[in-house]
Amino acid sequence: MTLTAEKPVALAGRPGRVRTFLGRFWFVYAMVLPVVVVLGVLVVFPLLQGLYFSFTDINDNNIANPVLDRPARYEITGLENYFHVLSGDPSYGAFWATLARTLIWTFACVFLHYTIGLALAVLLNRPMRFRTLYRVLLILPWAVPVFISAFAWKYLFNSEYGLVNWALEAVGLPGQVWLGQSDLALVSVVVVNVWLGVPFMMVALLGGLQAIPADLYEAAEMDGATPWQRFVHVTLPGLRTVSSSVVLLGVIWTFNMFPVIYLMTGNNPHTRILVTYAFERFFSGATRDFAIASTYGVLILSVLLVFATVYRRAMRGQGEVL
Amino acid sequence: MRPKATATVAALGLVSALALTACGSGAGNANRVVYWDTSNPSESSVFAGIARECGRTGGYEVAVEAVSFDQALNNYKTAAQGGQGPDVLRADVGWVAQLARAGLIQDLSGTPLGTDTGDFLAGPLESTKYEGRGYGVPQVTDTLALFYNKRKLDEAGVAPPKSWEELRDIAPKLGGDKAFFINNDEYYALPFLYTYGGDMVDTQARTIEVNSPESVRGLQMAKDLLDAGAARTALDQPNSYGNMKAAFTSGEVAMVVDGPWAAAEYLESPEFADPANLGIAQVPGSATPSPAGGHDYVVRQGSDATEAATKFVECMSSTPNQVAIAEKLGLLPTRRSAYDSPAVTGNRMVAAFKPMVDSAHSRAWIPEGAELLDPLQTAFADILAGRKDTRTTLDETAKLYKDTVVPDYAKR
């Protein structure tokens, strides 16, 4: 109250408003400054640099070499990289097909994460024997480093010696080439990613479930609601805040999920998503085509920004504040 | 969903950053040579031992860091770009030209390492050249060969095949697709590519050759072997090399194509407990069917320990040390004088591989050489899986070469 009353006086004040302003708020600014600097150096600067690189032809051979005192020789090429990429040319990663695959991958993974995670969370939320043991076991995949899981699964999916094919053949089904040159490879990496990702969803949703007051269920039960009705009308609305956050996070993570795909299938074009292709251009082989990789980076960021905006608007429409 | 994954990646990044700074700390010391060894686990202890011995007798410190072969090129480039990294790198012959072009390794032509090259074999020496100057010292040389299970071939009453057609014809006697395992990695596609005179590029005429009729015919031969039931492959590319080794060492298949680096591992298996059971012959096909491979020592541009590094490379590639490496690992020396030693010529691996190395198919020693291989991996896997017709696949590869790898080469 007093603050608002005093403000106009300060603004019109004689000793200079900047000084009064700083005099009053210096502490706040001093506290915020390190964060701003760190974010600027670690986030904003590289982001702008990446954006700039996407308009040049920068690569391994024309960047500056401090050891040789060689200056940078890359040139601005305008929108050329974007034309190359957006034309969908296979030499530049077949952008549209890759985007479509990325979307399929993302939505398949997040959908399965969410539904399986929710089912397990509901199960584990009920009092039962060995509940802690089950929880620990279900969180295990999350605790194992991803590359170890990926290599273990790569072995399970081995078309000749893998356990998966062995099990299929044991029940009389034909074995499949899981990680080969077909869309089955995408199915395989989705399976692995779901296996890895469900624990997080489960834990997050379990937290959400425990925050729903028990008397709501009692009241619903008194009114004669069936278990399904209780799930739809009490549980789901009660989880909405948690769900909307974890789904948004899940989409962003999965969209940029690199290790599972790359460690399991390498350069297989059938599992290529936008980030793995950006990585391929940046690191794999000898190309180190920083320009095309940056272009992909900018496009990935743009797609995610559009998605996040639309998603937030949709959530706000439902009364959620995200 | 992965804070976990992000954390892993971040941790890996952090660890490698720390590793890089650790190497960097050695960079300021003119008397300490950091050596990145990319040899495989069964070889690295021998190299490390010789490296330490070189340091001890030469009066400088040597730090050997084992770096995985797959990661070494990238890590080296990132580190060297920032003036860090090892003083000496064991570089694949295909990396030298591109590192030289990027200015990341030293031109050795003015140093004793560059001038005193008369003793080295011509083939390996060629791989150290970029624009007429020498950038490396050959460490070992190699090529691919046909490894076969002698007992199985004897039982079937056949000799190692001289051509792919012959392999196809004798396969039924060896149990059809138990005859041969095709690894669908790109490097193992090269013998097929070369068989009828194909290649990836022609550096003289500056043309892209990967989709030439000869190349198409060569890779089609690999597919034909599968179709004829004369060979098998792992259709899941990531498991391919592992499955090939497993199939061969368990006695499931009779023949594979591999390099001398794999011999040590093969000999550890019960199937080849008697080393005489492991037969080695020239890869079927033309007179020069196999790619020339191997490794070179290169010195990092900007290394503070250049003088010690030079001495180190000199010591590592000296005749006695090459003899020792050949004797212990069966890897092929690059010095002529090393072959005077009975310990070398008496080594079974060396004796078997030497004539093949002499006739190995020289590769395109251009900066883009290594980059040409990546697209070939996908193409070869696609062809073997029967996803696409050979000609179409290779036309696409040629387009990719033209668009992104060697834009100034002519397409056929």
Image (spheres, coloured by chain):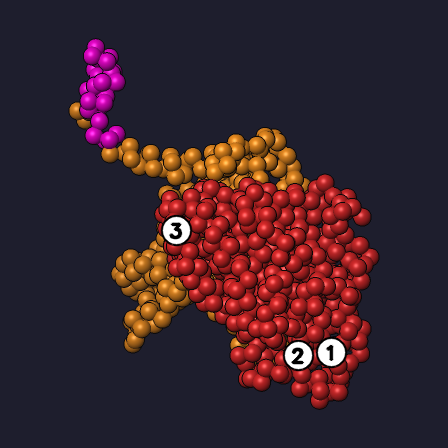
Chain colours: A orange, B red
Q: Earlier in the sequence, mark 3 or mark 1?
A: 3
Q: Which residues are magenta?
A: A4-30
Residue A60, can we see it? no
Q: Which residue is mark 2?
A: B279
Residue type highlighted by circle 1: Pro
Q: CA distance from mark 3 to mark 2?
A: 43 Å
Q: Is residue B39 above or below residue A76?
A: below
The furthest residue to the right: B213
Q: Residue B255's image quarter?
A: bottom right
Q: Earlier in the sequence, mark 2 or mark 1?
A: 1
| Residue drawn at (70%, 42%) of the image | B407
Tell me, yes or no, whether the highlighted magenta stretch contains residue A9. yes
Residue B105, can we see it? yes
Q: Which residue is mark 3?
A: B32
Q: Which residue is mark 1?
A: B160
Q: CA distance from mark 2 to mark 1?
A: 9 Å
